[in-house]
Image: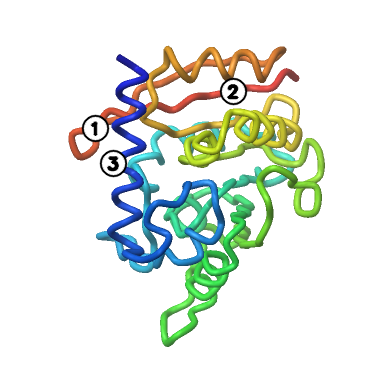
Amino acid sequence: MAALRRTLHLASLAAGVRRAVAGSLAGSCLAYRRLWDKLPAQPRQGSAGTFDWFFGYEEAQGLLLPLLQEAPAACPPRVLDVGCGTSSLCTGLYTKCPHPVGVLGVDFSPVAVAHMNSLLEGGQGQTPLCPGHPASRLHFMQANALNLQPVASSGSFHLVLDKGTWDALAQAGLPGAYQLLSECLRVLSPGGTLIQFSDEDPDVRLPCLEQGSQGCTVSVQELGPFGGITYFAYLVQSSN
């Protein structure tokens, strides 16, 4: 049943991409950059200039904010969004989190990164984004999620977010997805948390996470339903 659900989800996701690009990349694997370079940002209600798979910041904030409050008080927690695309997760944390936070969004699509930097800085006649706390910071950088060494040192982030990135990479095979997981765990600080947002059933995802993150605590929380679909937040917490 879970395998069938995953197949149907990927077919639906790919159909959405095909409708968005409506061109020669229509049948491409979701793990390929050239597809995402051609996918335009489509406004989401309440999140102008961003486009979200699954759901956006508003639906995730109830889970994210308590985790940020648990961070050591000595310095603002750092958040990494891996495969951020043009999602509202980064911008929502930056503009709506009442506590100081440093947010870095990375994506392998230069088009997506340029779009989000333009949104942040107020390009094309838009108003620059204002932080929810004066000490908060937001940056977007182009990077390969399978090798985050150029942008993220080991143990440097309290919270790492993956919304659909594992799902996209897994289309090209699980080795890439496991490499993504390895990099996410490498950059986690002691006691930090990786969250994978997905609609993949726990009986499929949990064994993969438990195999690839030995020594960590793996759990799952149900989210939604949003738009009639139940999602899951898979939490992987590193040891102290």
* Residue at (49, 41) in percent of width and height: 168
Q: Residue furthest bottom?
A: 125
Q: Disc 2 on helix, strand or loop?
A: strand
Q: Give how far across and how far down residue 79 sits, in percent.
A: 62, 45
Q: Quadrant of the C terminus?
A: top right
Camera-side residue: 230 or 20?
A: 20
Q: Please indicate whether residue 68 sits to the left or right of residue 190 in the image.
A: left
**Residue picked out by circle 2:** 236
Q: Judge whether 13 appears above or below 190 on screen.
A: below
* Residue at (58, 19) in percent of width and height: 209
Q: Amino acid at mark 1?
A: Ile
Task: Bin the neighbour count of mark 2 within 10 Å (Cα to Cα): few under 14, some 14-19, many 20 and up.
Answer: many
Q: Residue furthest left?
A: 228
Q: Quadrant of the N terminus?
A: top left
Does residue 188 appear in this view? yes
Does residue 132 appear in this view? no
Camera-side residue: 119 or 68?
A: 119
